[in-house]
Amino acid sequence: MTWRLRVVHTTGFAYDAPVTSSFNEARLTPRSDSRQNVIHSRVETIPATRAYRYTDYWGTAVTAFDLHAPHRSLAVTGSSVVETEAVTIPVDTVGWDQLDNGHIRDQYGEFLGGTGYVPTTDRFDDVAQRLRREHSPANAVVEAARWVREHMSYVPGATGVHTSALEAWEERRGVCQDYAHLTLVLVRAMGVPARYVSGYLHPKRNAALGVAVSAESHAWVQTWTGSWWGYDPTNGVPVNEQHVSVAVGRDYADVPPLKGIYSGGGSTHLDVVVEMIRLA
């Protein structure tokens, strides 16, 4: 089944003193790939800014903009219409021996090594080796995500955007970002290339057409077992029509929806609203 979804993501900044200039990057444009087709997408700002678009190293569309007139607020809105499809857990086209091959490890080395949010550690080696012995690569990915769900509690607000996988593990609590990061730690420890995906999830599986619902940014993983495919550790399901992918990278640091610098302004108040509508 194919869904057509409208996504509107608005981020508002309010400053307690005028900002004299700011430089920003927005990753709000969904990806076009084998399961997703972008029909329309744009990024707009208030006040209006000078903007240009480029594709970053990981293949994500980035809208860069700067503003040099004094301002006390800034609103950034990404709006898109996207068609999505579900994926199924693939039949493995490579085995463990091939994943251990030096050529494969070199080719996908950036998605096997440690990062700030997904550090290399031997803490999960026993689990990783057991999953390798008992399962094929694709099924081992699913079991790794299941293991994370069994050992973590989903608690909104328990962690922040700067929390690493190991910090979340110490608390045994977190949100989708932490579930994705912990799954990446375990999957990479098994020797499976894996990357972080940011995007959106429509919260209603049986969504009525034309009804706007409040949603949030979401995170999941993609792994390579002969081809790239997505799995959602937080919900324990393969990526489906409800998922709209925006950016991929090694971890959250490669995919934040907005990042930038500014001068002046003092402290900042942030407000984020995501709305999704199933159109077809």
Image (cartoon, rainbow, N blue to C red):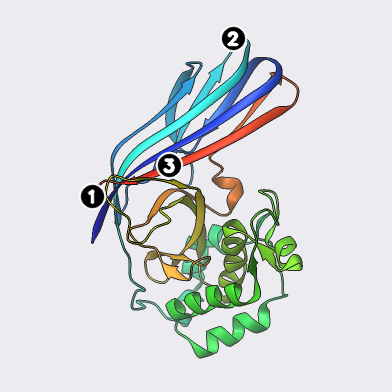
Instruction: Classify mark 1: helix, strand or loop.
Output: loop
Q: Is residue 189 above or below residue 48?
A: below
Residue at 56%, 46% in the rendered image: 254
Mark 2 → mark 3, Cα distance in angstroms: 30 Å
* Residue 215: x %, y % from top left: 47, 48
Mark 1 crowd level (few <14, some 14–19, many ≥20, 10 Å Cα):
few
Mark 3 → mark 1, Cα distance in angstroms: 16 Å
Which is more toward the observer, 253 or 176?
Answer: 176
Q: Earlier in the sequence, mark 3 or mark 1?
A: 3
* Residue type pointed to by label 2: Ala
* Residue type pointed to by label 3: Glu
Q: Earlier in the sequence, mark 1 or mark 2?
A: 2
Mark 3 crowd level (few <14, some 14–19, many ≥20, 10 Å Cα):
some
User: Which residue is label 1 attached to?
Assistant: 280
Tell me the mark number nearer the camera, choosing from 2 and 3.
Answer: 3
User: Which residue is label 2 attached to?
Assistant: 69
Mark 1 → mark 2, Cα distance in angstroms: 42 Å
* Residue type pointed to by label 1: Ala
* Residue 39: x %, y % from top left: 26, 40
User: Which residue is label 3 attached to?
Assistant: 275
* Residue 99: x %, y % from top left: 47, 75
